Image (cartoon, helix red, strand yellow):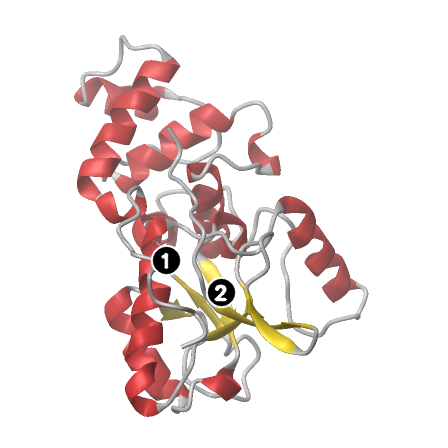
Amino acid sequence: MPAILVKPLVMSIYKVNGAPVPMPERMARATPDLKKGLYGVRESLKPFGGRLVLSDLFRSYDMQLQAHLDFTSGKKSAFSPAPGGSMHESGRAFDVDLSAIAVSLDAFWELARPWGIVPIIATPNPKTSECWHFERRGSHQLVHDYYSAGKASNFAKPAAAMAASAIISVGLQHDKFKGTESQAYVQSALIRLGHDIGNMDGEIGPRCRTALQELGLSGATLAGQIHALDALLQQRFPEEFFDGAADEISPFH
């Protein structure tokens, strides 16, 4: 089955009747490993008097489309890709209110790193666009690395392939794989498990079949292959599938 999305309790920049509130329901979705990371970073900021306050977390397909249209129309200046190109759509990205963290941006990077949370800009310059954007890439970093190494070429950028892998891994829509989502899911799993299968394109070709044969899955149905690959992924990346982060800590603290 696809990896799950869970509801993290984290503060947002939004207010109701003038009072700050946690992330709205429609945005409060994250992978289990990102949820754990958010809670870890929040606790790491407390000794410095900082707070973890988010302006964005999960985006649905329609929310990502609107963000993209706002960018292309000039309504917002920060780049926002078309649906299918953002880690926000997989519950693996968030935007942080830097005015609340009470530490420098480079210090925040250091606090976030042990939790697997990384920036997308090269240097911690608070004047750089997207300095507020962070990701918990998990096993999908392997897809990024796979494309960066030139092992596949059907995405314009490795980051786009990584986002596609992350999105389909939680069972959500990606326009590139209409009608072949399950096959693309198999390909994403094989890449993350270390197999060289060519492009992640939703078409099970000879190299995919060879990889499946090596795993003893060549005779299985597509559903059976997915079930077996899920078991392997859960063994290798358990933090992506199981929610172990307790919610007792109030986001207001």
Query: Percent from the top left, x then y, of residue 88?
Result: 52, 56
Q: Amino acid at mark 2?
A: Phe
Labelled pair 1, 2 in contact (Cβ < 8 Å)? yes
Q: Is residue 65 above or below residue 224?
A: below
Residue 159 versus residue 214 in the image, above or below: below
Q: Which element is circle 1 on? A: helix
Residue at x 41% of width, y 86% of height: 105
Picture residue at 29% right of the left edge, 78% below the top: 44
Residue at the location (43% across, 70% down)?
Answer: 251
Would residue 141 be seen by someone viewing this image from the given angle? yes
Percent position of residue 205, x then y:
39, 21
Q: Is residue 236 left or right of residue 60?
A: left
Q: Which residue is mark 2?
A: 94
How many C-alpha atoms fall within 10 Å of the one at disc 2: few (<14), some, or many (≥20)? many
| Label 2: which secondary element | strand
- Judging depth in this view, the residue of 248 and 30 nearest the camera is 248
* 116 vs 248, nearest the viewer: 248
Q: How many marks?
A: 2
Mark 1 or mark 2: whose residue is earlier in sequence: 1
**Residue 178 horizontal/vertical position (percent):** 60, 28
Where residue 219 sits: x, y (%)? Answer: 27, 8
Quarter containing the C terminus: bottom left
Q: Which mark is residue 197?
A: none
Where is mark 1, residue-wise?
A: 34
Q: Amino acid at mark 1?
A: Leu
Estimate the spatial distance between the alpha carbons at disc 1 and disc 2, rounded to whole Å: 9 Å
Count residues near mark 1 (Cα–Cα under 10 Å), then give few for <14, some for 14-19, many for 20+.
Answer: many
Residue at figure coordinates x 29%, y 69% from the top left: 40
Task: Please indicate whether residue 161 sits to the left or right of residue 32 in the image.
Answer: right
